[in-house]
Image (tube, rainbow, N blue to C red):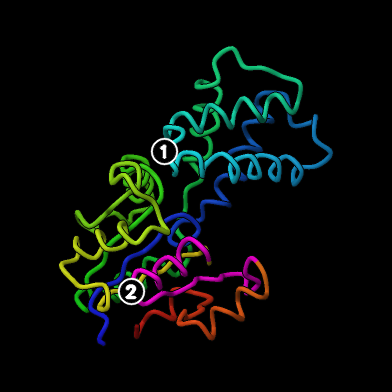
C-alpha cells in the first residue's frame, strides 16, 4: 500500500529534547547554586531525567495534569538534595525558561520536511499538551509544515501507544491507517504502538543502540523499519 501521509513524534524525533533539557537543568542548577551538590553534571542530568521518566507516565495515564507532573518532578528532585522550594511552580518555570532557549531541531529535519511537502501529508501525534508542542515547533521554525494536523494526548484524552490516538492522527490527514507512516524514537510507545494500530512503523534509533539490543532485533523482523536518520524517509 502506498504511503500518502506521515505522522511524527516531536521530542527526540524532530526536536532535540534531551539536549535542551540537559542545557536547561545544568544552567538552572548553576544559577540556583545547587550544581555543586552533585558529583558531576552527568549525575545531575541523570537524576532529573530519571524522575521525569517515572512521573511523566502518570500524566499520560490521567493521574496527574501536565502542570501537576512538573510540580511532582520538582519536589522529588529537590527532596533528593535535601532542599525545598517555596514555590515549586516558579522553580520549574525558571528551569523551563532556560530549557526553552536551547530548543533546536535535529540538523536534517527541516530539509527532510521540505522535501516531503507536496508528496505526502504531514502531521504530528505527541504525548504532551498542544500549547507546549506548538510553541516548541514554532520556536524551531517547523510548525508551518503541519498546519492544523497536530494532535496531542492531553487534549485528545488518550496517549500513545493506544491505537485511538494514532487513528485520530490519520483522520486529521484524511487517510486510512494503512496509508500512513508513523515515525518516533521510542520502540515501545511509538514503533510498537503504530504497528499495532495498523500504520507503517518507523523506529528512529539515532544512536544505533536502541533501548535494548533485543528490541532492535525484534523490530527488524517484526514489521518495524529501523532508521538512523529522517533522511531515510525520503522514499517512504
Q: Which image quadrant: the C terminus?
A: bottom left
Left or right: 160 as drawn, with respect to 165: right
Q: Which mark is residue 226?
A: none
Asked which secondary structure carries label 2, the reply is loop
Up the image or down, 161 lies above or below 94; here it is below
Residue on which disc 2 sits: 198
Magenta residues span: 188-211
Q: Position of residue 108 (x, y in %)?
A: 44, 70
Left or right: 115 as drawn, with respect to 162: left
**Which residue is painted at 47% across and 28% down in the image?**
68
Q: Which mark is residue 62?
A: 1
Residue 231 visible in this rendered orientation of the protein: yes
Q: Position of residue 120 (x, y in %)?
A: 23, 76
Earlier sequence position, callout 2 versus callout 1: 1
Q: Which image quadrant: the N terminus?
A: bottom left
Asked which secondary structure carries label 1, the reply is loop
Query: Disc 2 and disc 1: Cα gap in Å?
Result: 25 Å
Up the image or down, 112 lies above or below 54; here it is below
- Is residue 201 covered in magenta? yes
Amino acid at each position: 500500500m502506498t504511503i500518502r501521509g506521515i505522522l511524527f513524534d516531536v521530542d527526540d524525533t524532530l526536536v532535540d529534547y534531551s539536549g535542551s533539557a540537559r542545557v536547561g537543568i545544568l544552567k538552572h542548577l548553576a544559577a540556583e547554586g545547587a550544581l555543586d551538590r552533585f558529583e558531576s553534571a552527568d549525575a545531575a542530568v541523570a537524576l532529573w531525567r530519571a524522575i521525569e521518566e517515572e512521573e511523566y507516565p502518570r500524566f499520560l495515564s490521567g493521574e496527574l495534569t501536565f502542570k501537576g507532573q512538573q510540580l511532582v518532578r520538582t519536589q522529588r528532585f529537590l527532596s533528593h538534595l535535601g532542599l525545598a522550594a517555596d514555590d515549586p511552580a516558579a522553580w520549574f518555570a525558571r528551569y523551563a525558561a532556560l530549557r526553552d532557549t536551547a530548543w533546536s531541531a535535529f540538523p536534517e529535519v527541516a530539509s527532510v520536511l521540505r522535501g516531503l511537502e507536496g508528496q505526502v501529508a504531514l502531521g504530528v501525534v505527541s504525548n504532551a499538551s498542544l500549547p507546549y508542542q506548538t510553541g516548541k515547533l514554532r520556536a524551531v521554525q517547523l510548525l508551518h509544515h503541519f498546519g492544523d494536523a497536530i494532535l496531542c494526548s492531553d487534549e485528545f484524552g488518550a496517549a500513545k501507544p493506544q491505537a485511538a490516538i494514532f487513528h485520530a492522527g490519520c483522520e486529521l490527514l484524511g487517510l486510512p491507517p494503512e496509508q500512513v507512516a508513523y515515525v518516533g524514537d521510542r520502540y515501545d510507545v511509538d514503533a510498537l504502538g503504530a504497528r499495532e494500530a495498523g500504520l507503517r512503523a518507523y523506529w528512529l534509533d539515532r544512536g544505533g543502540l536502541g533501548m535494548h539490543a533485543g528490541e532492535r532485533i525484534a523490530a527488524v523482523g517484526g514489521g518495524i523499519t529501523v532508521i538512523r536518520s529522517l533522511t531515510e524517509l525520503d522514499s517512504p
